[in-house]
Every structure is written in structure tokens, then in C-alpha cells.
Amino acid sequence: MQGSDKVQALAAEYLFARIWAVPASITLFAIQGWFIGMQDAKTPMVISIISVVMNAVFSVFFAFNLNMGIAGIAWGTVVAQYTGLLISCVMLFIKYHEYIQYFDIKESLQIKPVIHFLHINKDIFLRSAFVVIVYTFFTAASARFGDTILATNALLMQLFTLFSYMSDGFAYAGESLSGRFVGEKNAYLLKRFINKLLFWAVMVGILFVFVYLVAWKEILMIFSSLEEIIASAGKYIGWIVAVPLVGCIPFMIDGIMIGATQTKLLRNTVFVATALFFISFYALSPFLGNNALWIAFIIFLLFRGILLYFCSDKLNVEKIMKQE
């Protein structure tokens, strides 16, 4: 990503500690997904809260009390992830132990269902890959503008992350309930659910716009006390204010389509949005610098929502319920 030598050294120090959490993180994704599929959103919420608190406590303890620096923050996350995994396994046994007898590896490996499962996951994998490419390139391009812009964009992306975490809650609801209503072939409840979900998505987006307009500086100072970085962030804060408005819809529709297993639509639309991201950045960056990166990011989010909306025939329930 062409960061400075100091940035690369710190990134490597973080990476080679954080990487030990990967087995726990992947397994935790699977178990949390199973809870959500069982219409149980409370258990993942409790586990997430505990993991976040553990992450904060151990990161501070390792980084400052044990003087481990940035590696201490990574090890704090490692401890939190394995703690979350342990709690998930305990909760799985306590709440759903009667289902354990139905876990049959041999039955799960029947060819036809596995092929369908892998086909759906292939599209979701490609969709996620394109999203990761955009986010990763965003960091890489930020590094090319210098350490100050790299730090500024990383700080501003914390505000995007706060919004995305809130929106993810609605998106998970979209996955769970749309899957349920599609499975029941209940068009009435699916349509009613989609309307309510989109209404609350827009309301959350408007709320975040208001919060960021009023208190962006105070929020950023929680993450950094460096006046130079805060001042630099102020030059680009308008883009972050725009993010909730253009980002609320694609988050919701994404969840609905995953629940309905309309994954090919997700793959194709994110491909086009990614192409528009890169075209916009390379066309504008010679003239607008870091602003071009944020414009490209806004275009990526905006067109994901527009394409998903119109390619689903304006969220036509009959089309959504048509399994591929």
C-alpha cells in the first residue's frame, strides 16, 4: 500500500499478533449466523457486547499497563475473539442443546444441497471480495497521499464504521426475516417487512447525519487528540455527513437479498459499483486529490443502492421471492 517505513513497521507488528484471532473470528461468524438464522438476535447482541468490552479492557491493559504498544491492541482483540467464541459455544449448548442430536455431518455433505450452498456462497464471496477491494484500495490510496491523510481518512472511517455497525443490525434483521418470509412464501408479510425496514433505515441515516453535523469533532476526539489530524479531518467531514444518506439503502437491500438468496444480483451490482469507484477515482484524483477518493467512495455506496433497487424491479416482492 506504499505506506511510510514507520507505518509499515507498525502495521506488521499489529498484523502478526492480530492474525492469531482468525480461527476464532471465522468460527464466531458461523455460530453468530446460526443464531440469527434461528431468529435469535439477542444472543449475538449479548456476545458482541461482551466481546467489545473485553476488547477495550484488554487492549488498554496490554498496550499501556504492559507497555506492548500497538501489538497489545491486537492481542486484546485476540483475547476478546476467543472469549466471544467460548461464550457462543456455551450459549449454543444451553439454549439449543436439544438440536445437537440432529447435527449429522454425513447428511450435511449430500452433494445436491452442498452444490446449492456453495453456489450461493460463491456469489456472496465475490460480492464481499469486491467490497473488500474497495475498502482496501481506499486505505492504499490514502497512504499514497502521505501519513497525515492516511491518519485522517482512517479516523474518518471510524465514523463510517459506527454508522455501518448500526445499519448492520437492520441488515441482519433483513437477512433473517426476509429468509423466513420467502421460505414461508408469505408475500404480504415480506412486503410489509421491507417497507418498515427501509423506513427505519432512512430514519437511522437521518439521525447519523444530524449527529455528525453537530458533534463530529467531539466524536473524533474520542479516537485521537492530535489537533493536526482533527483539523485535517474537518476539511473532509462533509463526505462523512453524506455517507449515511447514500449508505443506508444498500445496507438494507443487501440484507434482504441475502435472506432471499438472490445473491447473483448482489454480485453483479457490486461489480458495476466497484468499476464506477475506480473510474471516478482515477478520473478525478489528478485534480482533486483526497477529495476524489471520498467522491469515488460516495459513488460506490450510492450506485450500490440504486442498482440494487432498480435491478430488483423496485423491490418487487414477487421477483424477490423467486428463488434462483
Image (cartoon, rainbow, N blue to C red):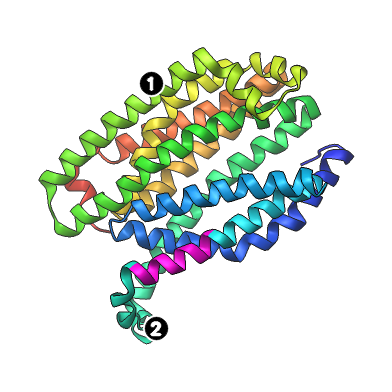
> Which numbered disc, 1 or 2, marks the residue that appears first in the sequence?
2
Q: Which mark is residue 105?
A: 2
Identify the residue shown where x is 32% and y is 70%: 96
Measured along the vertical axis of the image, is residue 17 above or below residue 195?
Answer: below
Q: Position of residue 51 (x, y in %)?
A: 54, 52
Q: Closest to the observer: 1 or 324?
A: 1
Q: Secondary structure at mark 1?
A: helix
Measured along the vertical axis of the image, is residue 133 above or below residue 289?
Answer: below
Residue that numbered label 1 is attached to = 206
Measured along the vertical axis of the image, is residue 87 above or below residue 273?
Answer: below
Q: Is residue 306 left or right of residue 177?
A: right
Classify residue 123 by image quadrant: bottom left
Identify the residue shown where x is 67% and y is 52%: 76
Q: Position of residue 244 (x, y in %)?
A: 45, 26
Kindly give the residue lying farthest to the right in the view shown. Answer: 5
Q: Is residue 89 on the magenta stretch?
A: yes
Q: Position of residue 260 (x, y in %)?
A: 28, 53
Q: Amino acid at mark 2?
A: Ile
The quarter in which the C terminus is drawn is bottom left
Classify residue 103 by image quadrant: bottom left
Q: Position of residue 275 (x, y in %)?
A: 54, 38
Q: What are the residue bounds of the magenta stretch?
A: 84-94
| Residue 322 visible in this rendered orientation of the protein | no
Identify the residue shown where x is 60% and y is 45%: 133
Q: Closest to the observer: 201 or 49?
A: 49
Q: Amino acid at mark 1?
A: Ile
Could you classify mark 1 by the number of other residues whose Cα lies within 10 Å: few (under 14), some (14-19), or many (20 or more)?
some
